[in-house]
Structures are given as structure tokens and as C-alpha cells.
Amino acid sequence: MSIHLFMSNNSVYNTTLSCDSLGIHYDVTKSSDTGIITVTRWESSTNTNHFVAEFCYPLASPDKVRLGGQTEWMKRGEFLKRVEGHPLSLSRTFMGNNGTQYRWKIHWPKWVLCYASKDEVNQEPLVKYHYHPLRKNASYLEICDPAVMSSLDNISHS
């Protein structure tokens, strides 16, 4: 059984990702002053918001990201790494907060998350990003494997 995290709108800059039945709620907001995009997670048990990540897309320098618990900015390419040996690939790998290496890859028209270390051809997707550009339906993340729930903070901002 898969879990769907629905977006309140189809903009990835000002939206919420939520599954009310499981108490999962992420806010993604963009500051009009600084242009920094902030991701927070609402903790239902304490009714508080927890910082997950921030992104900065400056015009004249590389994109930057700051992950929860870190004070220093890093280049986005240090977190979302290109797949070695495939310089033109849009696939990116990152380390989950559970120590597992994941890979986002494109299966047009959706993005698919899988394990980076396993055979790419035969593995089932862990997460699928369903984008609906005409806004007839809400875009959403479909979590196909509940094992990735422990890395949801890293997946939500990758």
C-alpha cells in the first residue's frame, strides 16, 4: 500500500506536502525579501514546526542548501550529486538521514526515487513524484515503500 503526500498547489516554492491521516505535514515557503526557500515539518505530537532545509538560488553563484542541524551552507551539488560516468544525466544521488544512498531519476513525466546501489533496471521505485501541470489534479509524492519514511526529511527537499 502506498502513501500519498499531496501538494496544496503545483508550485514547489510555496506549498504544503501532507498526508492528514498519518499526521505528515511539510511547508515549503519562499521569502520575498531574500528569495530563500525554507522547508519545515510540523510535528503533530508537540504542535511545533521543525526546520528541515533551506535553499538559495543566487544569480551569480552556485545554488546553496542548508540541511536541518547544519549552520553552514553547502553547494547544492555537494548534496545532490551527479551520477558518475553520466555527465549529461539528470539523475542525482543523495545520502538519506538513515545513511542510505538514494537516486532520483526521470521516468517522464514523473521523477522516481530508488536505491543508488542496486541494479537500476530491475528495482521497484521507492517514491514517485506525480506532477500535474494543468492543475486538474494535485501533484503528489507517492511513497511506494514505507522503509523510506525515516528519510522523509531528506527526500522532501532533494
Image: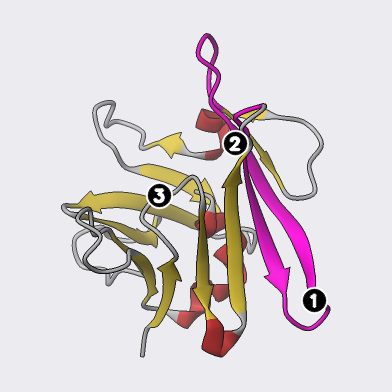
**Is 19 rendered above or below residue 62?**
below
Number of the front mark, 3 or 2: 3
- Does the magenta segment cover residue 135? no
**Residue highlighted by disc 1:** 47
**Which element type, helix, strand or loop, lies under badge 3?**
loop
Residue type at mark 1: give it.
Asn
**Which element type, helix, strand or loop, lies under badge 2?**
strand
How far from the left and from the top, in percent, is residue 138?
32, 67
Q: Nearer the viewer, residue 35 or 79?
A: 35
Q: How is the image coloured?
A: secondary structure
Give the label on residue 11, or none. Answer: 3
Where is the N terminus found, in terms of image quarters? bottom left
Give the residue drawn at x 25%, y 34%.
89
Q: Assess disc 3: are there few (<14), some (14-19) or many (≥20) residues with their C-alpha within 10 Å of its C-alpha.
A: few
Give the label on residue 33, or none. Answer: none
Give the label on residue 55, or none. Answer: 2
Q: Assess disc 1: are there few (<14), some (14-19) or many (≥20) residues with their C-alpha within 10 Å of its C-alpha.
A: few
In 3D space, how far apart are the residues under numbered discs 2 and 1 (Cα atoms)? 24 Å
Q: Which residues are magenta?
A: 34-63
Give the residue drawn at x 16%, y 52%.
108
Q: Assess disc 2: are there few (<14), some (14-19) or many (≥20) residues with their C-alpha within 10 Å of its C-alpha.
A: many
